[in-house]
Amino acid sequence: MTNKPVPPIAAEQTDVLWFLPTHGDGRYLASDIGARHVTLNYLSQIARAADELGYFGVLLPTGRSCEDSWVIASAMVPLTQRLRYLVAVRPGLSEPSMTARMAATLDRLSGGRLLINVVTGGDPAELQGDGVWLAHDERYVATDEYLKVWRAMLAGETVDFQGKHITVKGGKLLFPPVQSPYPPLYFGGSSEAGQIVAAEQVDVYLTWGEPPAGVGEKLAHMRAMAAERGRTLSFGIRLHVIVRETEAEAWAAADNLIRHVDDAAIALAQKTFARFDSVGQQRMARLHGGRRDKLEISPNLWAGVGLVRGGAGTALVGNPDQVAARMKEYMALGIDRFILSGYPHLEECYRFAELVFPLLPLRETTGNAAAGARNAGPFGEIIANVAAPARTAAAG
């Protein structure tokens, strides 16, 4: 394979997803001050808000620090109307036949609102605690086998498969999903082994929020790898957001988010992340180097979250026009969906939709509910009980 560069195709429109904080939420990172517990009522507030505001879907994280994503999604589905749920399958922790049945069931019960996030895992200590002892590249061999069986079963095939890690004889799914051939597969992997799996098997390749130049290089590489296999990929990016009506307010909110993060907390977090064999996590850590003095790594892109939080460690920070402009820069590289979060997740869910949705070229699958609400009745405080407020442009 020659891996010839494939020019980017700019995304003309985008979908936006939000995040359900099944590991907890609050006003400050690394602090129990103002912390919010994971309860059915609180998570349902966020899911219902995202649904009503018109977000395309929500991501449910996975790992031992989180409540189980499948159980949470099953609890949220009947509380929402159109919201999609991006739920994790974990090769090595489950058999593909089991999660194929789970996926088909949840897709049917939700009316086709299931998305699948394939998570191979990047923390050897956590994986060993879950009984997975495979080395980094071997985990992706197992992931590749897992997805071959999973996809075939959901597509209605009877599966006979003999692999290094998975063996199936006569595997069959009796009740198909709503979405054909199966709920879309999302996947993020920055190593060569992970990228091979992505190029051959998934529908949406995800990256964490690096500066646009780095994202552009990664997407060009993935586009070329997929093209050599006769495939095309969609691209998504995972970011936090801190948007306020003025830039000064946004940066003040960013500083406030880590006001209780001390040097000991940073050192402990970075020591833990250093044991990860995830290339993506290593790339995140290099953006800030554990230092607090150089956190704006690109215009309006702030690495402060990654000082103490694993996975996505960067946030778009600014006023609505600035945040929208940065998102459009990623769209020019081919990003056609954003998976966003912000602290606390309930308030930031509203703030982002209200301030930034009007500035983005959204697909009709994002934003419809919010637009409909504006036209269906009173919006905002009625002036002197007699006059509706005039529509104004979002603050910039």
Image (cartoon, helix red, strand yellow):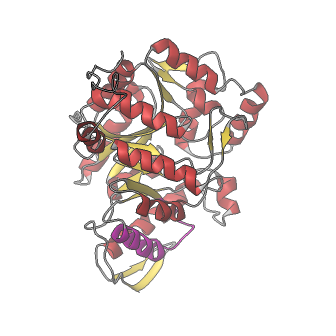
Q: Is residue 94 magenta?
A: yes
Picture layout, residue 288 above or below residue 107: above
Seen at 65% across and 20% down, the residue is 292
Depth check: give the residue in front, 330 or 77: 77
Seen at 57% across and 22% down, the residue is 254
- In this picture, residue 125 sits left or right of residue 170: right
Depth check: give the residue in front, 249 or 173: 249
Residue 295 makes an appearance in the image: no
- In this picture, residue 255 sits left or right of residue 101: right
Residue ranking furthest to the right: 264
Residue ranking furthest to the front: 385
- In this picture, residue 164 sits left or right of residue 255: left
Seen at 30% across and 35% down, the residue is 378
Name the image quarter holding residue 304: top right
- In the rendered image, the quadrant that contains the C terminus is top left
Q: Is residue 55 magenta?
A: no
Which region of the structure is painted magenta? 88-109
Picture layout, residue 360 above or below residue 117: above
In the rendering, at what x and y percent does residue 40 appear?
A: 57, 57
Residue 185 makes an appearance in the image: yes
In the rendering, at what x and y percent does residue 164 appear?
A: 50, 72
Name the dominant secondary structure of the magenta segment: helix
Depth check: give the residue in front, 388 or 316: 388
Seen at 39% across and 23% down, the residue is 323
- In this picture, residue 198 sits left or right of residue 39: left
Residue ranking furthest to the top: 248
Depth check: give the residue in front, 221 or 387: 387
In the rendering, at what x and y percent does residue 328 appear?
A: 30, 27
In the rendering, at what x and y percent does residue 179 appear?
A: 27, 65
Q: How many marks?
A: 0
